[in-house]
Amino acid sequence: MGPVCSGDDADPPACFGGGDAVIWGKRALNDLDEEIRDHIERETQDNLARGLSPEKARQAAYRKFGSVTLAKENARAVWVPVWLDQLRQDLEYGIRGLQRNPGFAAVAILTLALGIGANTTIFSLVDHIFFRPFAYQHPEQLAAVHEVLRFSGATRVVPVNLVHFQEWRRNWQAVEGLAVIGGLRMSLTGVGEPERLQTMRVSANLFSLLGVQSQLGRTFTLEDDQVGRDHVVVLSDDFWRRRFNADPSVIGRSIALNGEPYEVVGILPHFSFPKVSELFPFTIATTTSPQIWKPLGALPAELTGGDFNFACIARLKPDVSLPQALSTLNNLQQTLPQRVSGATLRANLVPLEDQVAGRVRSGLSLIWAAVGAVLLIGCVNMTNLLLARTLSRRREMTIRTAIGASRGRLMRQVLVESVLLSVIGGIVGVVAAYFALHVIVSAAPADLPRVNEIQIDRRVMTFTVCVSLMAGVLVGLLPAWRLGVLSPIDALKSGSASVTSARSTGRLRALLVAGEVGVSALCLIAGGLLLHSFSKLLQVDAGFAASRVTTVDVSLPIQRYATPVSRSTFIRTALEQLQALPGVVAAGVSNKLPLTGEGGNAALWPERSTAVSESLLGDIRPVNPDYFRAMSIPRQQGQLFGESDRDKPVAVVSAVAAARLWPGEDPIGKQFHIGAPSLPPIQVVGMVGDIHGVSLDRPPSPTVYVPYWQSVMPPGVNSMDLVVVARTTEDPMTVSSSIRRLIRQLDPELAVPAVRTMDDVVTDSFGQRRFQMALVLLFAAVGTLLAGLGIYGVISYSVAQRTHEMGIRLALGAESRRVRNMVLTQGMKVALAGITIGMASAFGLARLLTSFLFGVTPNDPVVFATVPLVLSLAALAAVWLPARRATKVDPLVALRCD
């Protein structure tokens, strides 16, 4: 137990910590001042009584008392820890010094604010996406489960088959539980404007598996999972607040989804659940967060079929590792019947956090590296500024040494000043990061995970404080060391020794600037490669013409459109009326748009082929005949199907599908099977050009177009999702309201979301690449700006130090041009040295960017030729002003300055 403090004689150092000691010490010193004044006043009165004059009486009192300052210092050493008091003095001295030199302080603070603010912004993204565990119980035990189909020489990672899931739940002993998730869209009616909602169809145990409890009502029970008892829903917190104004009485009420009543049984807390696109092993278009959850209610057909349609989450037992769980699951897979002929069945396990964030990990890591480079360049600039400031203060520091200050105390003074600047820069950087983060989040691509969680919170602030302190210490180390090795005698000299010290520091500063130019060269190379790659991507022929095409999603509820005839009637009527609108050239319909991801794939089998090596996985798209004209997909051979083909199964294939199924042969008239060789054959009537189904940086998928009236609704799907497209003669958005009004007139209960243009679809398809490129280029530009400022600072200081020399040169008749060229040469030597270092490093490091590039090599000659030119021009601009100033030196003024 520590000492107990009581009474007036308590020992302050024993009773108080550092902070309390300072407070107590200030109060005690104030009392001491009063006691000293009282003591001297009494002594003065005694001297006056002895007959001394007032002036001599006070002088005698002071002589008898001794040094007032020494008495205060001795008392301070007792009452306040020495290091803490000295730190306070250093801080006060540093603040006064910065107030005397506001220009230096402003440049230093803004330089560090750029680096620290950029790192705070990007760390907020990286931390929330990568490092924050999900708000579930023991998230480290959660894993995403996929199935793997291995054909002859090919591997395909697919979602989970529901039949296999049932077997796993019964026999997989390595897990505590399993849950499946399927995505669908449902239309809400009867509550204001009809709305199309992203819905999760989940097994009843999902929320207990995650450890998530409802904030109101309940989640699902096993009884809810039964067909006929599955008309209950749980709402997300955001949706509940947006559509029902957070009304708790919504529990127990019925809402109309797809025209059927569903009872609201619970409201989930505000938590982050992955989007459907983040759970599936391939790219799909769904990028909105789920708003409604409904029980699985698996249909009999789903428990016997061979479709792979569900995401799956497993909770591993605490003592089971991921490899152990995967091994036992693969053993179980070998006992299951083949649902894809000729395929070997395996499984894949991925930690849930990696599944959600894995696709953006490398891109955000690259951006974080770029902002780290910006901070490094900023710190080097700060070091250069402090070196120059330290050199200009060498006489001051030497005088302080002469009157008793130790070198350690002086070095600490420099470190305190650098940390002070860094902390202020960090505060400014956090303010800037707050606004920058809002801009970046609003500009982020829709498929950036957990974006709704990103904010500057206590954890981010802790990171910023640590970075600020570390940057301050690192920035001050070199100037403090240079001060420590400075000879007091040399510092007091104004001759050769002082000049030698200045030149030595100048060489050190030039070396630092060369280093930051090299780092900025690396950043520009990375940004240039991404930019060139992006430009190559934009040149890719998508296979269709996106301009002047508008699109709108429509979901036909299966309850009201239960038969193929009813669905076909709606589609045909909608297309006919759409075609009749002014400005509409062609109208089409499909199950999905190009460049919106995978899904709807099936095996394609040439007729009379049963060998799996001869099958092909193709993208099946139900369309109408005019779809090809609406999308400007060119017909290459044969004809397009028409109304006369209603009674016979026909298809139009893409060029790559024809080449893969019948290499070197004419595909027209050929027959093939979709799904399995035992199903009825389909005849090819035409061939069209290839389209990019997933993204422009992936090759065109083998695509099969079938008449929409021949498409079959798979089991478990409660709506037919369509995309209506219209090619117009003018701005496509001018007909958007007409399209929405037309669909509402056909069916007032259909939810019609906002209309999009195909140009928007194309732009969204490379959102991640654009996001990465823009941020890397932005931070590379900031780094180049800081490097240019570094060159400017070094050359400006050099010109100031050599004013006397230049004055002599000009006085002796040197041409201004030669003086200017001398300064330009000095600056460009530093820049070219840095460029050389950076380019040499880039040749070795650029290969790390291979996975980010498209259509360019890591050592792309265009980029490697452009970046040195850009940096050289930036360096020339930075050096030009000091060089021009050097030619304006007045020789008489320069000679007097020395």
Image (spheres, rainbow, N blue to C red):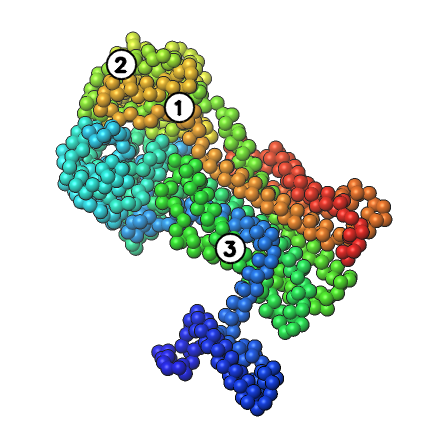
Where 116 falls versus 483 (above or below)? Answer: above
Name the residue: 71% across, 58% down.
502
Kindly identify which numbered label has been placed on residue 424.
3
Estimate the x, y position of residue 785 in percent, counting from the top left: 59, 43
Where 170 falls versus 542 (above or below)? Answer: below
Name the residue: 35% across, 38% down.
278
Q: Amino acid at mark 1?
A: Thr
Kindly identify which numbered label has been placed on residue 860.
none
Report how far apart the C-alphas of labels 1 and 3 lie in the structure.
47 Å
Question: How busy is the neighbourhood of tag 2: few (under 14 within 10 Å), some, or many (20 plus)?
Answer: few
Frontmost residue, 12 versus 659: 12
User: Which of the 4 quarters of the picture holds residue 14?
Assistant: bottom left
Estimate the x, y position of residue 737 in percent, counting from the top left: 33, 21
Q: Amino acid at mark 2?
A: Thr
Name the residue: 27% across, 12% down.
646
Q: Amino acid at mark 3?
A: Ile
Disc 3 element: helix
Q: Quadrant of the C terminus?
A: bottom right
Report how far apart the C-alphas of labels 2 and 1 lie in the structure.
22 Å
Q: Can see residue 609?
A: no
Mark closest to the chain's N terminus, 2 or 3: 3
According to the picture, the residue beneath numbered tag 1 turns out to be 757
According to the picture, the residue beneath numbered tag 2 turns out to be 573
Mark closest to the chain's N terminus, 1 or 3: 3
In front: mark 2 or mark 3? 3
Mark 1–mark 3 contact, CB under 8 Å? no
Mark 2–mark 1 contact, CB under 8 Å? no
